[in-house]
Image: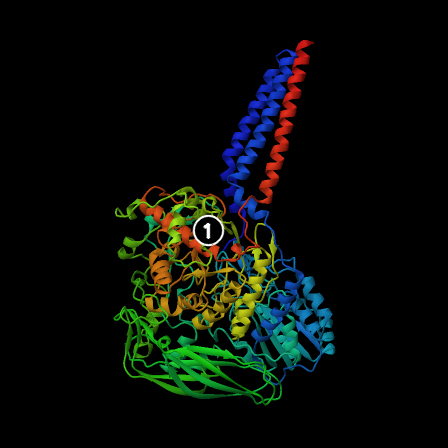
Amino acid sequence: MLTVNMADVINVLKLIAPYLIALGVVLVAAIAVVIIAGRREKATRFMMRRQSLLALLLAIVAIANLICFGPMSNMITLATGNGEISDKTIDEARALSEDVAGEGIVLLENKGILPLSQKKLNVFGWSSTNPYYGGTGSGGFSADFETTSLLDGLHQAGFETNQELSDFYTAYRTDRPEIGLFGQDWTLPEPALSTYPEQMLENAKNYSDTAVIVFARSGGEGADLPKDMTAEGLTYNQNSTEYNDFSEGQHILQLSKTERDLFDTVCGSYENVIVVYTGANTFEMSFVDEYPSIKGLIWCQGLGQGGFPALGDILSGEKNPSGKTSDTFVRHIDKSPWFNNFGDYAFDNVDEFTLDSGDMYLGVSKPHFVNYVEGIYVGYRFYETAAVEGLINYDEEVQYPFGYGLSYTTFEQKMGDLTAENGTISVSVTVTNTGSVAGKSAVELYDTPPYTNGGIEKAAVNLVAFEKTDLLQPGNSQTLTLSFTEESLASYDDKNAKSYVLEAGDYVISLRADAHTVIDEKTYTVDSTVVFDESNKRSSDSVAATNHFDSALGTATYLSRADHFANYEEATAAPASYSMSDEAKAEYVCNLNYNPTAYNNDSDVMPVTGADNGLKLEDLRGASYDDERWEQLLDQLKVSEMVSLVGLGGYQTLEVPSVQKARTTDCDGPASITNNFTGKYSIGMPSSVTLACTFNKKLGYEYGHIMGKMCDEMDASGWYAPAINTHRAALGGREFEYVSEDGLLSGTMIAQEVIAAKEFGVYSYIKHFAMNDQETNRWNMVSIWAPEQAIREIYLKPFEIAVKEGGAQAVMSSYSYIGPHWSGANDSLLNKVLRDEWGFRGMVITDYFLGANFMDADAAIRNGNDLMLVAYEMGDNTVNDQTSATGIKALRTAAKNIMYTVVNSRAYEPENLHTGLYSWQIAFIVVDIILAALLIFLELKAIRKFKELKKA
């Protein structure tokens, strides 16, 4: 997503340029008449000058009307919208932020120091005065709302902090370097150790014997975190002239030298040190083992504008931490299987698909690529399987497993028997608080499927269900029932069966403290292999799944478990070839070679348009998607109406007069509802990663509930969120906005958000569909090459859950190509999988419509994408083919999908429905009438004066 930016301003100026030129011509003509009039006799001179002035005024009024009721109409309507968050809702959001942060903060280490009895703390690290609250871009926050700082959170919990230290950091720098869409400053501000006054350090020792070190990493839309902090062109200002913070090859998720110097000094001076990391991206935490004085380590993933009081409560013991890691913390990020295939890779043989856009931001549009060489072995699925196969020493590679987190109490979890009924497998787990303080416990259930060497790829460990207890007092127990379907144990066989397959054998269902630590396990046996093909589709599918992404396989070597990952070195190496294959070129589509008429079907029958059937869109509220009245309603649409409805979908859906469709407003922001036109925002909530780490579905629902309520108060029917792409790589720039490395955790939490927001009539655009798992080259035609098994089991899975379980009504497609086809014009993705297989009924919108070399409205609507995310006419967002039967049918289908979604939203609740003129239009008309009267009065006065001068 993009917000309004300079590129928008330039494009809008280009749009209204003809009107401004016309006004300029009238102005020049008026001046010429004034000059010529100087040679005429007095009465004529007066009349010529007066008429030229009145003509100029008339032209100004007329052109202003043409601009405002023409190309600027949408943006003026958006900018004059109503709605803002009430104080009551802000208070509710703050309270929920503390609840989410309280259960999402993860205690990674506790060597007997927490909770703290010491109430006076030395808080070290520049980030203590400027921590990480959340990401940038569409995930950014507004300064209009009070932000509770980290130090404020500690103070509210009753801690006193060393003000001398805080003043020192504030004096060093007050703002965090900007990581934005159009430029990134990766500087990590931290005073060099040599600048610390010795007396201040001595005073700190006298102030308290306990130290807290805070450090942070920030991410944002538009750029991934640097793999090499010394790379050419990277903006980074060193903290000292005496040394460099990073050496060649070091990435940003390691301590800088300045940070390391601070750790050396603090850990050498204090026996009790607590480290607080604020950042959504997992970090290399091996340094903890190097400092015996580090007794506590806490992960705060982005707590929003109201979440930091929870950190204070956790340190004090008022809250008992219960968060679990949503991602795996590895010791060596650069040894991860994705590391050599993440980032910037340009094809070297694609001149025919390359275009110099002339745009200041887009520049040269040239196809790029990324090979998802690890296949299904993403995150913990790789590390757990690699350990089983003997490829790695687990403890040397993994520091904190997926699903890991400590508590101030202890729990006993007992697994009951497995039961199977009607295709659903259930197991009861009794959780008992065996410690001395109240707390909550996440319950995690995994499966280990039978694996045949060289057969279908399978991870050794897969999350299949999770729940979370209520707050349990010491000695109290709670029994939870965890359920999952037998068919969810199936693996996708993209080579032979080309469908989901549940192979015969023993499936070990294990209760684990985390992805690695087994508590207990039971065996579920499948007697015979089940193939979920067209004659036996999965119960959750409308149409049986089969291969639709063969063209995305590419030429890379993909990681296989066969023979104990025998191809690991070959598969995970950097790309061996940068050339697009001839087969891929034959299928590759971009704006340079797209011709809509080549895709027309001569057998298509031209639909009826402009009929007078007497229907209004509101007549179909609550009607089935297949209700026969839809065809009658669609017959009433004019081609011009459909073209505008489809092409101008930025932050809105347009009104359609022929069916009295109301305009709706859509707002941005996964953690803060943002209206880029009115400048109204909601308070910034904790990041999706924080929410994921709660492992609490109820909090997921409550999060969606408050976001839906804030949308409702801001008069927004659509929400450009939640975002659920996969945490494929720790260096992903948008990890804060996405959820987890695990599709079940991501999809389940997001489904709850979608369900809750829908209760306010808000349709959530789950995004970015699909494979938008890095920011690098996202605008530059980046083709993702991956096996279909990985595409389905890893990258589509969270979306599938959000659609099937959450009932998502809207989807935002991505900038990414899946193989040779842009996701926003990908029939396999948007029609065959999303609509046909999953049964989705609703609308699909593009990501921000850039006018780039791959975004074309005609290609989009012919392949299942209904709406272009831009608020003004800028070329390729207008459907080119407005005459063929095929083109009109595609317009008609897109219009139906949009209207079906909108009519079942809050926009069509009686108190919200608006189909008439807007206040600005009424005001404009009133002003026009007054100006018309004034011009008539001035004209009559001029005529009277002219006659008087003539008589004289």
Compared with residue 69, is residue 199 higher up or lower down, i.e. above or below? below
**Picture colour scheme:** rainbow
Q: Which residue is mark 1?
A: 617
Q: Of the residues shown, which amino acid type is indicated by label 1?
A: Leu
Query: Nearest the camera: 940 or 498?
Result: 940
Residue 752 in view, yes or no: yes
Residue 593 in view, yes or no: no
Q: Is residue 875 left or right of residue 434?
A: left
| Residue 559 placement (x, y as % from top left) | 34, 71
Query: Nearest the camera: 298 or 63?
Result: 63
Compared with residue 835, is residue 73 higher up or lower down, i.e. above or below? above
Q: Is residue 649 left or right of residue 576?
A: right
* Residue occupying the point 62% across, 17% down: 47
The part of the image, by quadrant, that contains residue 725 is bottom left
Q: Is residue 479 left or right of residue 34?
A: left
Local packing at callout 1 (Cα closer than 10 Å; few below 14, some 14-19, many 20+) is: many
| Residue 380 placement (x, y as % from top left) | 43, 76
Q: Quadrant of the C terminus?
A: top right
Query: Nearest the camera: 612 or 336?
Result: 612
Secondary structure beneath dot 1 equals: helix
Residue at the extreme top of the image, as rendered:
952
| Residue 730 placement (x, y as % from top left) | 47, 68
Number of dots carrying numbers? 1
Compared with residue 61, is residue 319 higher up or lower down, i.e. above or below? below
| Residue 67 placement (x, y as % from top left) | 53, 37
The part of the image, by quadrant, that contains residue 106 is bottom right
Q: Is residue 277 left or right of residue 341?
A: right
